[in-house]
Image (spheres, rainbow, N blue to C red):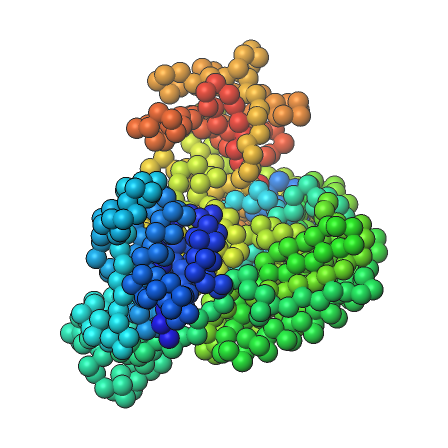
Amino acid sequence: MRMVVVDLGDIDAHHCESVAAALEQFTPLPEALRPGLHVFGARGPSRYFGGEQALSELVVRAAADSVPSASRIGVGMADGLFAAGLAARVAPQTPATSTSQALAVEERSVSLSTSTAVLVVPTQQSRPFLADLPLTFLGDPISPLFSEDTTEALLDVLWRLGIRTLGDLAALSEADVLGRFGWPGLLAHRLACGLDDRPLQVRPADEDAGAEAEIDPPADRIETVAFMARALADDMVARLAHDGLDCVSIGIEAESDSGHASSRRWRHERRFAAADVVDRVRWQLEGWYRSPNRPTGPVTLIRITPWVTAPADGRQLGMWGATSMADERAARALARVQGLWGAEAVTVPRLAGGRRPADTGRRVPLHAAANANRGQDSSATGPRNGRKNRKAKAKAVDAPWLGRLPAPSPAVVLAQPEPITVTDCGGAPVTVGGRGEASAPPWQMTDSAGHSRTVVAWAGPWPLDERWWRPSVRRRQARFQMVLDDGSAHLCVLESNRWWREATYD
Amino acid sequence: MEEALAPLLPEGGIRRGTAVAVGGHGSITLAVALAAEASRRGSWVAAVGMADLGVAALAERGVDLDHWALVDLSERGRDRNIAADVLGAVVGGFDLVLVGPAIRVEGATARGLLARMREHGSSVICALESASADTAGLRPEVRLMIEQTRWTGIDNGHGRLLARQAEVAVGGRGAASRPRRIAMWLPSKDGRVAYADPTQISDFGFGRDFEDVRERRAG
């Protein structure tokens, strides 16, 4: 199947929509793999727009117009998604003006910093085109191996066997590769041979695979809506299964008689079964009814849209990469809390590098933690980078952070430090001089509610001077540990002559 | 249950489907220590309404961070109905749930929650605002009240917080109804939360009515 891939490099997600809109003049179904990587089928459009080369050049201009800030725009056309994507990636750059001299005058608006590149690989020529490309392209975002955990190891072994290009891999016998490397190896071999038979996925908001139902008479009970949703979900899952797809992420929209609407996206770490979809509908409605935006009338419409689908490969992944009954139970409980409360309510603790208590631990949103465990960290451009990043992070946690207070760490770290006052026995505020000495021993601490307590023991001040090389983000603190007469112990800091309680050793 | 903490609880551990209340200064440290062993064994632990929980302290108590989830309820969490719904959902999926002091569950919702805990065999540890706070809602089987604490290692302008000695009053219903007092490190110099042997600490100085845990465990 002839495919066109438009590669704009890393662009901001909000540009995704403008690219998709620009591509809609060529095809009714542009699809985004991620922002900056768009694809559509070439057969019909290339006939209409006067041939493949002409279509590609029109597409590259339209894309350049839609995102003027892109530094490089590549358009590739080939048999299959993989070859087309690599064609877009490796296409030789052409200066913007030479694309078409005739149109140069009106194209002044296109930023000159954007370089455009077009490469059309003729029909049946994908394999020779791929043969010279390095093997590492199998880990490219366009590759179906991109999100596989095993890809890095597979490429390592192939490299050590002396296989440097896709052509080297394609020259091996398919049976040998399958025998030695199993399913991922076979997939890699087929890709290298130019046999990428992945179906073109519908674009995210496609109504074809999604389904909606008008609820007539309008329902004021959640169970009624859930009953309708059940039929929709069965239908959607069955249709996707027919295409060999698993649904990973769905959008659920509900509209009410009163004009209120609720729209949320739900992600499932394995794949949605119909019952899972119905659970999400129920939970979303429960959350909606409790929210400030709650409907004042009955529900009239329910719509379920598959947002992200993945080839069904029978793999099952738990929330944190493990799969046991207990994990499944916990994952369902958290999904339900997210429905009642919003996705940001659930976080996972992670250690981080830093000196202040608020920096040494972070709260990672649940979905981000799950993605990071699958090597799909959104900040990484590929599985290799993802792994490298995590290694670097681990190092940062273990590295000695000079100036960090030793254990025990405070059990309570205030998200918002509390302003306090600390005075000496004469009632004057305690300050810290330029030589790092307290002006007087702290005698009394008054919290933000005005309650005062006597300081029975204290230690410090320990100076902290972070990022002194950049005045705009520099922070200078003097830290004290203080034990009060009620037995509580606190970490208090003095910053710019103001006292804060940062943490409590509860 | 970690062996060092077993003396705190009459049955050597938290009985499934029941609640334990922890109060006083140091209650967060003690609650986390009670939960740490469960997380290390692969049980799922959720901390609900503890937005200020220090992550570094969790790691120091030996918590397996991969089996720990934080559910933060903002101001809306004070709405008792929503808090009860969220707790009900969490209790259905987690073996052990830590509940922060801001969340209060009472009356019929508390009875429903208790039934759900028994049904799923999950336990709850409630951290109380103060030792005198009311815990009637979840009918805790064991109450651990930290009544007296003393930090060591810190002086007027010298040293740093190093270890904390605490006196824990154990009370409750059933097997725990006989009140006891136990001396604890919360934590000790090497970072452990464990019972302190009063006979070996010359300067413990809380009084002589401690139970000698060594004898009790030997006998």
Q: Position of residue A267 (x, y in %)?
A: 55, 62
Q: Is residue A102 above or below residue A284?
A: above
Q: Is residue A352 visible?
A: yes
Q: Nearer the viewer, residue A280 or A115?
A: A115
Q: Nearer the viewer, residue A160 or A21?
A: A21
Q: Nearer the viewer, residue A175 or A51?
A: A51
Residue found at the far left of this picture: A162
Q: Is residue A325 above or below residue B139?
A: below
Quarter of the image containing the N terminus of chain A?
bottom left
Snapshot quadrant of residue A332: bottom right
Q: Residue at x 31, y 57 (%)?
A: A57
Q: Residue at x 34, y 47 (%)?
A: A70
Q: Position of residue A259 (x, y in %)?
A: 75, 50
Q: Is residue A198 above or below residue B153?
A: below
Quarter of the image containing the C terminus of chain A?
top right
Q: Residue at x 77, y 65 (%)?
A: A215
Q: Is residue B135 above or below residue A428?
A: below
Residue found at the far front of this picture: A102
**B163 left or right of B131?**
left
Q: Position of residue A217 (x, y in %)?
A: 83, 64
Q: Is residue B88 visible?
A: no
